[in-house]
Image (tube, grey):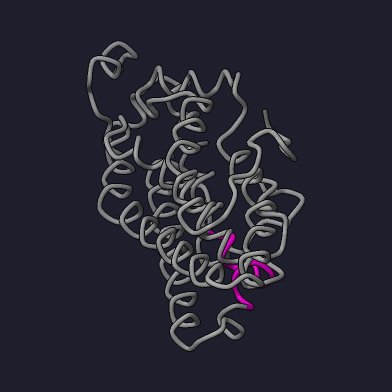
């Protein structure tokens, strides 16, 4: 049996090692991997993503939306495949997005009703994913770490860059800037909420097992420090980080 002390001291766990790890570690890994996979599959929601394949302003925008959907589904399928290596967990041929009421994040329960909404969603929410993944590229569950490092994080970084470019373009005239500000005001608190409760016991458990490096609040503050000057650089105001929050 692989001990907690060995993992804390730097031992990485491959899929074949997984059954020989402590139950708490197994439970945390399964939760982490399963949540990641289901969150990726939100791109199958027509009200958030699908409509913009047809209705984004330009052909190039529509292509980039379609590419984002393709990449996100690819992430989800790869993570589900990894999950099935350690647990016979899910039939990936039958994947559909969770109903809105069952989605873990409130941000995934709201439609992107306007192009500005979709731009803000992509810019702000995918950046949250980046912050999560940056500390998982060398986490103790080695197959997941490799997948994050070589595939998911580079593509997630490209997604948030697309959102930034769309939001910057929308903000280039006064009417668009007002619409972009309203969208940022809606999605900024939802993005901050996806980073979790400040006093989460599970967050500390993830750190203990080298599955994550920072607490939820540490990650949220790093996100705020990074994203605030970017928002301001395109002429928008950074919303109050406590306004309209549901997860504190």
Is 45 magenta? The answer is yes
Q: Nearer the viewer, residue 183 or 41?
A: 183
Outermost residue toward the bottom in this view: 59
Residue 208 at x, y percent in the picture: 40, 17
Give the main secondary structure of the magenta stretch. helix
Which residue is pictured at 42% across the width and 74% down the height? 67
Which residue is pictured at 66% across the width and 50% down the height? 107
Outermost residue toward the top in this view: 5
Vertically, is 47 above or below 209? below
The count of marks equals 0
Which residue is pictured at 39% across the width and 56% down the height? 156
Is 199 magenta? The answer is no
Indicate the quadrant where residue 241 lies: top right
Horizontal side, residue 129 vs residue 102: left or right: left
Horizontal side, residue 32 vs residue 144: left or right: right
Residue 77 at x, y percent in the picture: 44, 60
Horizontal side, residue 163 vs residue 211: left or right: right
Which residue is pictured at 69% across the width and 70% down the height? 47
Vertically, is 45 above or below 201? below
Residue 225 at x, y percent in the picture: 45, 36
Residue 45 at x, y percent in the picture: 64, 67
Vertically, is 48 above or below 201? below
Q: Quadrant of the C terminus?
A: top right
Q: Nearer the viewer, residue 48 or 223?
A: 223
Indicate the quadrant where residue 78 lies: bottom left
Q: Quadrant of the N terminus?
A: top left
Residue interval drawn in magenta: 41-51
Indicate the quadrant where residue 247 lies: top right
């Amino acid at each position: 049996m692989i001990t907690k002390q060995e993992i804390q001291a730097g031992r990485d766990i491959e899929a074949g090692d997984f059954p020989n790890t402590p139950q708490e570690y197994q439970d945390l890994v399964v939760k982490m991997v399963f949540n990641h996979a289901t969150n990726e599959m939100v791109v199958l929601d027509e009200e958030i993503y699908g409509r913009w394949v047809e209705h984004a302003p330009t052909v190039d925008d529509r292509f980039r939306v379609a590419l984002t959907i393709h990449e996100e589904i690819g992430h989800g399928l790869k993570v589900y495949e990894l999950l099935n290596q350690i647990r016979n967990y899910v039939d990936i041929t039958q994947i559909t997005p969770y109903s809105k009421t069952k989605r873990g994040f409130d941000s995934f329960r709201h439609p992107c009703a306007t192009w500005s909404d979709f731009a803000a969603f992509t810019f702000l929410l995918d950046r949250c994913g980046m912050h999560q993944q940056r500390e998982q590229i060398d986490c103790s569950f080695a197959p997941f770490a490799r997948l994050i490092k070589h595939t998911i994080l580079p593509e997630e970084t490209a997604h948030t860059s697309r959102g930034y470019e769309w939001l910057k373009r929308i903000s280039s005239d006064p009417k668009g800037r007002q619409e972009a500000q309203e969208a940022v005001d809606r999605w900024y608190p939802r993005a901050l909420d996806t980073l979790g409760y400040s006093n989460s016991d599970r967050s500390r458990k993830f750190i203990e097992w080298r599955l994550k490096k920072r607490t939820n609040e540490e990650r949220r503050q790093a996100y705020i420090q990074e994203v605030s000057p970017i928002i301001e650089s395109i002429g928008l105001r950074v919303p109050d980080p406590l306004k309209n929050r549901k997860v504190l």
